[in-house]
Structures are given as C-alpha cells and as structure tokens.
Image (cartoon, rainbow, N blue to C red):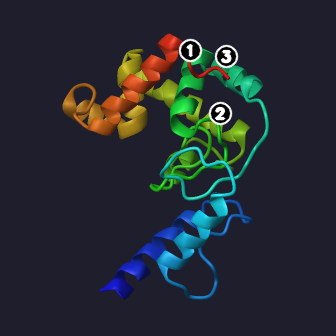
Amino acid sequence: MSNVLNGILRQKMMEIQSQLPAFVKLVKDDPVSFNDVLTSEVNQTNNSTVASPDAIGSVTYKGDFNEIINNASKKYSINSSIVKAVIKAESNFNPGVVSSAGAMGLMQLMPDTARSLGVSDAFDPTDNVEGGVKYLKEMLDKFGGNLELALAAYNAGPGNVVKYGGIPPFEETQNYVAKIMGYIKNRTFEK
C-alpha cells in the first residue's frame, strides 16, 4: 500500500515540479520514496525563509515590491493596501513559496489559474502580482465590487461563493477573509 501511495505522491510532486523554475528540484531523477524527497526539501528549507507552515520550498528574494504592487494596483484600479494585504496573507511577501496544494509565488497562483491569466513565470514578482491583481479584479467585478466576496472567491473559487450565496462555510475561507480585512483595517501588512 505504501508503494502505491509513494507512487501517487511522487507523480503529484512531479506535476508541481513541472510548474517550477528549473533550479527548483522537488523530485530527483532516480527513484526515491516521497518521504525521502520531502525530508530532503524540509532540511533544505529549514535554512531559508519559509513564508507559511505548509510551504514545500522557498527561494529567498531580497527586495521591495511596492513599485510592482502600485503599478498593478493602478492598472486594475484596486487600492494597493488590498493587494498588500492579500500578499501578506498568501505568501508573507515571499515570491518563491509553494503551498502544499501547488499555489506559487507572492499571490499564490495555482498553475492553471496562472496560465489562464497569462502568467508565464509565477515566481517572477512582476508576473505573479500582475496575474494575481488581474484575478482579484475579475472577482471584484463578478461580485459587484464586494471585497469580502471577491476575497472568498480568490481563496475558495468563485463557484463556491455562488453555490453558497456568499462566503462559503469553510473555516479556512472565513478565516482568510477576516484576516485580510483585519490587515487592511489595521494596516498590518506594512513593513
């Protein structure tokens, strides 16, 4: 049974790896167990900055994203404080973080979503923020400018917001919306 699970997990890791820059290796070419790969990655990331507890790996980036955020905010007519709050909640300003679900970069874009938004490199801060803000704008437009519903859709998908007629009854999504609204209110996303 564990060989079957290792095979499934290895395949999933290879799918995620195919979306990552070439220098990020989650799966080695020679066959090893998923546990060995994960342990190796955890050991490597323990020496670097990891933005969230569910991060698989990270790339350290020293830089200021204000100009990138401001440009995308102006382009899509979204207050930069909202964008900063989303980035704070999603990646804590770490452009190299990958979630356990495979979401990547500053605004934690899923590979299919990134592609649909025209993002060619989800780890590039400019590409990622451009795509993430564009998607957030789409959600704001879809939900009549209601920020809480747009944030819920950003987290749980627009289909779930429509299905439940509001913020879905998922604890993660409810906490996510409350966290971002709190960041905006208290301006705790500022460095």
Q: Residue under circle 1?
A: 187
For residue 21, what is the image quadrant?
bottom right
Local secondary structure at mark 3: helix
| Residue 169 in the image: above or below residue 188 | below
Q: Position of residue 150 (x, y in %)?
A: 40, 25
Q: Residue under circle 2?
A: 130
Q: Residue at x 38, y 87 (%)?
A: 3
| Residues marked 3 and 2 touching at CB (< 8 Å) | no
Residue at the farthest top position: 185
| Residue 173 in the image: above or below residue 77 | below
* Mark 3–mark 2 distance (CA, rounded to whole Å): 11 Å
Q: Earlier in the sequence, mark 3 or mark 2?
A: 3
Q: Position of residue 126 (x, y in %)?
A: 72, 36
In the image, taking residue 41 as reference, residue 178 lies left or right, namely: left
Which of 121 and 141 lies nearest the eye of the viewer?
Answer: 121
Image quarter of the N terminus: bottom left
Graded by Cα atoms within 10 Å as few (under 14), some (14 to 19) or many (20 or more), the crowding at tag 2 reads: many
For residue 82, what is the image quadrant?
top right
Which of 9 and 135 lies nearest the eye of the viewer?
Answer: 9
Q: Position of residue 156 (x, y in %)?
A: 35, 39
| Residues marked 3 and 1 touching at CB (< 8 Å) | no
Q: Which mark is residue 74?
A: 3
Is any part of residue 77 visible from this angle?
Answer: no
Residue type pointed to by label 1: Arg
